[in-house]
């Protein structure tokens, strides 16, 4: 009897794994994958996880100010050390995918909190960002941010 239960559980596990692989490979769209990358970047900032944040950044990343991937990670790490609490809110996200390239355009807002002994004079700093555009490239089935830039708003 135990042998049959073990085989049944094993069969269910194999079916679940095959179902996940089919879903991940054939059903999940690149638009959803890009959205998940942006949402995960938000989560990694809030959780102070610089390693996971860096996993989403392409080695050849560059932003509009000329900072590369290493400088971006240093800036983010400094922010994580300076603020005990980071809350990020992303609104009005629009995603476009074309082949192995994609863009995500959204409004970011951050609420940064530190104790009074922190780096900054204020306990809480709220930043509402300009419209931000992330350019992503698919590398080995994973989407990575390769460029970020502010987008001028149309009046």
Image (tube, rainbow, N blue to C red):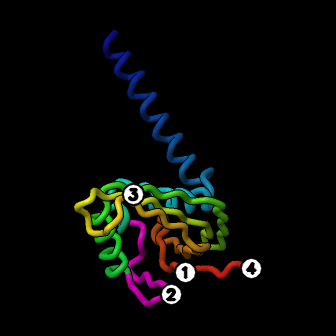
Percent of width and height locating residue 11? 44, 28
Q: Are marks 1 and 4 in contact (CB under 8 Å)?
A: no
Q: Nearer the viewer, mark 1 or mark 4?
A: 4
Is residue 64 covered in magenta?
Answer: yes
Choose top left, top right, bottom left or bottom right for residue 116.
bottom left
Is residue 132 covered in magenta?
Answer: no
Q: Which residue is mark 2?
A: 64
Is residue 94 among what the camera can see? yes
Q: Are marks 2 and 1 in contact (CB under 8 Å)?
A: yes
Rendered residue at 41%/83% (across/down) = 60
How many angstroms separate mark 3 from mark 2 (CA)?
24 Å
What is the span of residues highlighted in magenta in the rendered image?
55-68
Rendered residue at 44%/55% (across/down) = 87
How many angstroms separate mark 3 from mark 1 (CA)?
21 Å
Left/right placement of residue 48 relative to residue 142 reads left
Label placed on residue 149: 1
The quadrant the N terminus occupies is top left
Left/right placement of residue 141 relative to residue 92 reads left
How many angstroms separate mark 1 from mark 4 (CA)?
16 Å
Q: Which tag, 1 or 4, sits closer to the chain's start?
A: 1
How many angstroms separate mark 2 from mark 1 (CA)?
5 Å
Q: Nearer the viewer, mark 2 or mark 4?
A: 4
The quadrant the C terminus occupies is bottom right
Rendered residue at 48%/78% (across/down) = 146
Is residue 44 among what the camera can see? no
Q: Which tag, 2 or 4, sits closer to the chain's start?
A: 2
Mark 3 element type: strand
Percent of width and height locating residue 66? 43, 90
Q: Which tag, 3 or 2, sits closer to the chain's start?
A: 2
Q: Which residue is mark 4?
A: 154
Residue ranking furthest to the left: 117
């Amino acid at each position: 009897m135990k042998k049959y239960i073990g085989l049944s559980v094993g069969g269910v596990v194999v079916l679940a794994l095959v179902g996940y692989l089919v879903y991940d490979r054939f059903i999940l769209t690149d638009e959803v994958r890009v959205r998940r990358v942006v949402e995960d970047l938000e989560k990694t900032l809030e959780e102070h996880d610089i390693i996971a944040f860096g996993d989403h950044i392409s080695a050849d990343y560059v932003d509009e100010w000329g900072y590369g991937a290493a400088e971006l990670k240093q800036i983010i790490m400094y922010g994580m050390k300076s603020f005990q609490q980071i809350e990020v809110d992303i609104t009005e996200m629009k995603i476009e995918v074309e082949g192995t390239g994609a863009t995500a355009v959204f409004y970011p807002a951050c609420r940064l909190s530190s104790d009074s002994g922190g780096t900054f004079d204020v306990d809480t700093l709220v930043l509402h960002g300009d419209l931000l555009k992330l350019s992503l490239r698919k590398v080995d089935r994973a989407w990575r941010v390769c460029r970020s830039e502010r987008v001028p708003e149309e009046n």
